[in-house]
Image (cartoon, rainbow, N blue to C red):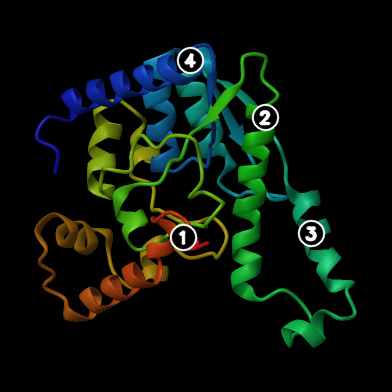
Amino acid sequence: MLKNPEKTVENVVQWIREYFESSMPNACAVLGISGGKDSSVAAALCAKALGKDRVVGITMPDGIQPDIDDSHALIRHLGIRTLEVNIGKITSAFSETFSELPEFETVCGQKSLSKPARINYPPRIRMSVLYAVAQSLPAGGLVVNTCNRSEDYVGYSTKFGDAAGDFSPMAAFTVHEVLQLGEALGLPQQLVHKAPSDGLSGMTDEEKLGFTYAELDHYLDTGVCGNSEAKEKIDRLHRMNLHKLQPMPHYEKNSEE
């Protein structure tokens, strides 16, 4: 847990300012606004660092999003610029393209995209939207990665989807530390403490993972997990998903080539 969340907020805010100064001094921070704790805290940090006029929050419902009001509440609270891009037509066209391929079943052994594919392509489409907006802004934009340390550790993100971005202000913080930052930033309680969900599977994060964030955070902070079943799941997910945290492997030429 953070010893002084308010001081940590100031440190992260200064880090964001320095990052923009050294890369794109007049650019905006661009991020997806889901209405959950991570996008809420990330948006608030960027607004504090850059000013609300240099933060663009993009809502990206896939057709109808039941909790879209939470995204709107955050945007109103921060007063940031916003754009809504409904990706419903894009995801429908994406899926239909594969269903119309007669050779798909021959190659993949099934008539349509698998469940993991259906869950993961919308986040990748959303990341494409963020970069499209960032590259269309007059002074340019840098895309915010909103992942936290806990989710990164067990790979609870989509590679080239929400795991992508230009800078990551919260990658060093566990879920419970992100909550502390949200409280220190004065964000609405219903956003900071909203039950985490990917908004795609109909399940909470903890239901999907099979352990609680409290168990995961304690394990990351202390190296101790009192639940042996949870520890085995955490270790297995970490091993399976290391490729999301490490640079892409590449062939190294030897001196004789």
Distance from Cα at disc 3 to Cα at disc 2: 20 Å
| Image quarter of the N terminus | top left
Q: Please, what is the three-letter code of the amino acid marked with disc 2?
A: Val
Point out which mark residue 94 bears. 3
Residue visible at 10% across and 67% down in the picture: 224
User: Residue 132 placed where, x, y %?
Assistant: 69, 34
Q: Please, what is the three-letter code of the amino acid marked with disc 1?
A: Glu
Distance from Cα at disc 2 to Cα at disc 1: 36 Å
User: Residue 177 placed where, x, y %?
Assistant: 23, 42
> Element under label 3?
helix
Q: Please, what is the three-letter code of the amino acid marked with disc 3?
A: Phe
Q: Report the residue marked by disc 4.
A: 52
Q: Nearer the viewer, residue 225 or 186?
A: 225
- Label whose residue precedes the other's in the sequence (4 or 3): 4
- Label whose residue precedes the other's in the sequence (4 or 1): 4
Point out which mark residue 133 bears. 2
- Label whose residue precedes the other's in the sequence (2 or 4): 4
